[in-house]
């Protein structure tokens, strides 16, 4: 059995275990079910996830052993002034999991001026996407490449940038998206084949904004779409990663470095290309 098949089966098995656990929790509200029944699928879900991450760690490397692949130099996927979040410069896996090829993924949010991005707090509970300078910002091809996957039909939801909304995202919305499929977590996205077994993924793309389709050839710096807030996202931002397969469900993450920038650390701001302009009004 190939490694790809094992990874797919593992993801499906984990999803099934979580679904069974939730079904037991709901059913226990109506019928008398021994409490330990729910611990069995929950324990299997945790064990499978641990095993998948451990296998991926051996393939990808980490901070302790060093990456199994040298960082791949590509252009930045944006222009203007941005801030890094969940950066692999601080920890690997950067998002706390190696699932979906995220070991070396990075999130970036636009801040054309200091404090120009709405702050996290108690109120308002949610915000419109237009309140964030990242929303609608162009996404650029990081290398000459071929588009191998492109979809932008999912909606851009309101932000989750308050404490109550964040709890909702982590406790309810996130797990519900996990039960769906990888695309429900990633949201609208585009995958570029950079050659030599390297693929670039842009996640949470704005609905209807993609300017490319599967099979198109793009050149470095060409616009492929716009930053959005689709999928498992707290606010409009760019989630970028390199991986060793076109399908993030079975891919391993690959380390990257942005030419002229490097890999910004958490909270670090950086300038890429021409300054990003804030829309009037």
Image (spheres, rainbow, N blue to C red):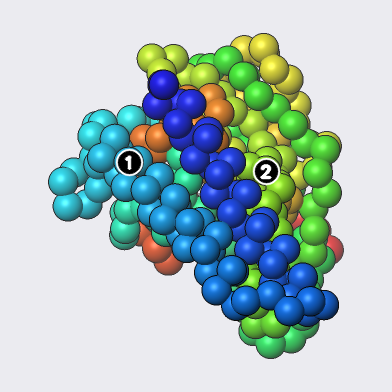
Q: Distance between the residues labelled 1 and 2?
A: 21 Å
As drawn, is 34 to the left or to the right of 62?
A: right
Residue drawn where x is 60% and y is 49% of the image: 15
Residue at disc 1, secondary structure? helix
Write down the quadrant of residue 79 in the picture.
top right
Q: Nearer the viewer, residue 137 or 247?
A: 247
- Which residue is pictured at 49% across the width and 40% down the height? 10
Tell me, for residue 262, which label it has, or none.
Answer: none
Query: Looking at the image, do the residues carrying marks 1 and 2 touch, with CB atoms under 8 Å apart?
Result: no
Q: Can residue 279 be seen in this view?
A: yes
Residue 130's quadrant in the figure?
bottom right
Mark 1 or mark 2: which comes first in sequence?
1
At x 26%, y 31%, the residue is: 69
Side (left or right) of 141 relative to 268: right
Q: Read off the residue under disc 1.
A: 55
Marker count (numbered): 2
- The answer to whether residue 118 is seen in the rendering is no
Looking at the rendered structure, the secondary structure element under dot 2 is: loop
Q: Where is residue 103 in the image (x, y as percent from the top left)?
A: 39, 46
Q: Where in the figure is residue 8, as x and y percent of width and height?
A: 53, 33
Q: Mark 2 points at which residue?
A: 181
């Amino acid at each position: 059995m190939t490694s790809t098949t094992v990874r797919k089966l593992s993801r499906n098995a984990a999803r099934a275990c979580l679904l069974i656990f939730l079904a037991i929790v709901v059913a226990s509200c109506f019928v008398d079910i021994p409490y330990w029944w729910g611990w069995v699928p929950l324990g299997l879900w945790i064990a499978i996830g641990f095993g998948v991450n451990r296998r991926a760690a051996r393939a990808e490397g980490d901070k302790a052993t060093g990456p199994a692949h040298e960082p791949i130099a590509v252009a930045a996927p944006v222009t203007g002034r941005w801030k890094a979040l969940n950066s692999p410069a601080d920890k690997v896996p950067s998002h706390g999991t190696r699932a979906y090829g995220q070991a070396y993924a990075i999130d970036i949010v636009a801040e054309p001026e200091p404090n120009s991005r709405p702050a996290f707090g108690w109120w308002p509970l949610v915000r419109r996407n237009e309140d964030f300078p990242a929303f609608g910002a162009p996404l650029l091809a990081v290398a000459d490449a071929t588009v191998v996957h492109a979809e932008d039909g999912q909606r851009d939801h309101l932000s989750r940038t308050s404490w109550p909304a964040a709890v909702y995202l982590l406790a309810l919305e996130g797990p519900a998206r996990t039960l769906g499929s990888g695309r429900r977590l990633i949201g609208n996205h585009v995958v570029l084949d950079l050659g030599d077994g390297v693929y670039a993924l842009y996640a949470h793309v704005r609905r209807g904004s993609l300017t490319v389709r599967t099979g198109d050839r793009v050149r470095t710096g060409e616009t492929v779409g716009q930053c959005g807030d689709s999928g498992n996202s707290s606010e409009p931002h760019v989630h970028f990663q390199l991986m060793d397969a076109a399908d993030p469900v079975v891919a391993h993450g690959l380390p990257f470095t942005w030419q002229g920038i490097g890999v910004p650390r958490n909270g670090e701001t950086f300038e890429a290309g021409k300054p990003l302009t804030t829309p009037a009004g």
